[in-house]
Image (spheres, rainbow, N blue to C red):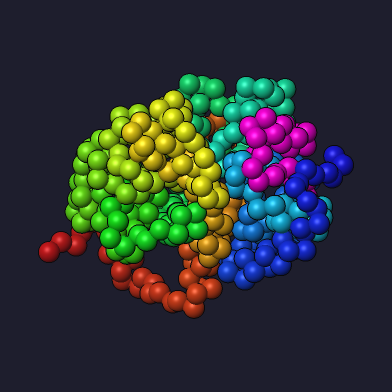
Amino acid sequence: MAKTYDVKDINLAKKGKLRIEWAAQEMPVLRSIKDRFEKERPLKGIRLGACLHVTTETACLMETLKAGGAEIALCASNPLSTQDDVAASLAKDTGIAVYAIKGEDTKTYYRHIMDALKLRPQVTMDDGADVVSTLHKDKKELLKDVIGGTEETTTGVIRLKAMAADGALQYPIIAVNDAYTKHLFDNRYGTGQSTIDGILRATNRLIAGSVFVVCGYGWCAKGVAMRAKGLGARVIVTEIDPLRALEATMDGYEVMPIVEASKIGDIFVTATGDINVISKRCFEAMKDGAIVANTGHFNVEIDIDSLQRMATGKRMIRDFVEEYTLAKGKRIYLLGEGRLINLAAAEGHPSAVMDMSFANQALCAEYMVKNAKRLEKRVYSVPEDIDREIARLKLKAMGIKIDSLTPEQKKYLHSWQHGT
């Protein structure tokens, strides 16, 4: 396939290249994998179609996969998450086929997915499962070429497991999101910091002293709650799972139904992966000036259609801040069109945490190429040895040493004879 691209401005490449270099400095694990890939070429001849957030960190992953021998086509996994200078640099400096423009409309978004699929990928790499679903619904003739894939988000894994349960999934996929070195760090520390960063860049509002409502208490939501609390907010958690609600309570947060929280909240963040978490009844209960944002993968968690129907007026008051005026002059502010605020208004997760997430992507792509023939058409967890190797490499890069078991301790852990 002839290398091509569709980016905002190829002349942004110089700036993008410098920003990629900056990110790479904080990604030592991925760098070590790239060094090995350059020598071993485990992906030689593999056509890889990636639908990811086109950021500086993603660029480092793409360079690693190319070093391993892969031919790559990359498209955006969200219309607002592309960093245009990075897309330009990938297209100009690496020759990777890139189809991504920040702010692209829905039609362009799906056209870009189709452009990437012209590569006829053998391996897919998804962030939300849009490439997988497009292949299964609209490009079934390409499925015969696909040997396997990876998925990085909670939302995508949910979709893929549903497909597998229905018998619809036509090739094996590794749930990169479920790796400890991904969800315990990327979701918690990455989402926590970058979500707050996106809200602050969009609004410049003071977090301290505010009533900050976090919808959900999965790993992403835990990170957001942790960082909001650290900035001095009064944090309220809403949940539907009694175990997570109990955990949030034990962690020191107030827990209550979303409608009750709607009456007192200043800032709301959804992080659930489900639809209409903040609904019409929530908007009706909110006070004037409430700020609403989403950090889940798709822009479905906030019922934007209801908000638009309720509004008597709408205007863009700041970049990424839409003001909706409701009856009696009440104003509600929607951030980033209800899309991932950490990527819409900020730069996404810090490089240091994406180092582990993308190390998982690279090593799982290698694993899939080596093992696809023996895998069934279902969703697999990341092999434990890959997860632990990434943690080991990260600790080594950080200069941290840990203990190891003595032969006596190993024997004890594998015996049943020893008692009190």
Residue at 76% across, 46% down: 7
Q: Quadrant of residue 170?
A: top right
Q: Residue furthest left?
A: 420
The residue closer to the viewer here, 343 or 351, is 343
Is residue 100 covered in magenta? yes
Q: Is residue 236 left or right of residue 58?
A: left
Q: Residue at x 20, y 50 (%)?
A: 254
Q: Count the marks: how many?
A: 0
Which residue is the extreme one toward the right? 2
The residue shown at (59%, 66%) is 27
Is-magenta flag for residue 40? no
From this view, report whether residue 308 is shown above or below residue 414.
Answer: above
* Residue 57 x/y as whole percent: 61, 58
Point 36% across, 46% down: residue: 289
Q: Position of residue 1 (x, y in %)?
A: 85, 39
Left or right? Give the position of 264 relative to 94.
left
Can residue 390 be seen here? no
> Left of 281 or right of it: where is 37?
right
Tell which of 149 and 129 is nearer to you. Answer: 129
Residue 401, x across and y down, in percent: 44, 77
Camera sees residue 253 = yes
Magenta region: 96-124
Above-or-below relation of 44 to 2: below
Name the quarter where the C terminus is drawn. bottom left
193 or 33: nearer the viewer:
193
**Residue 310 % position (x, y):** 40, 27
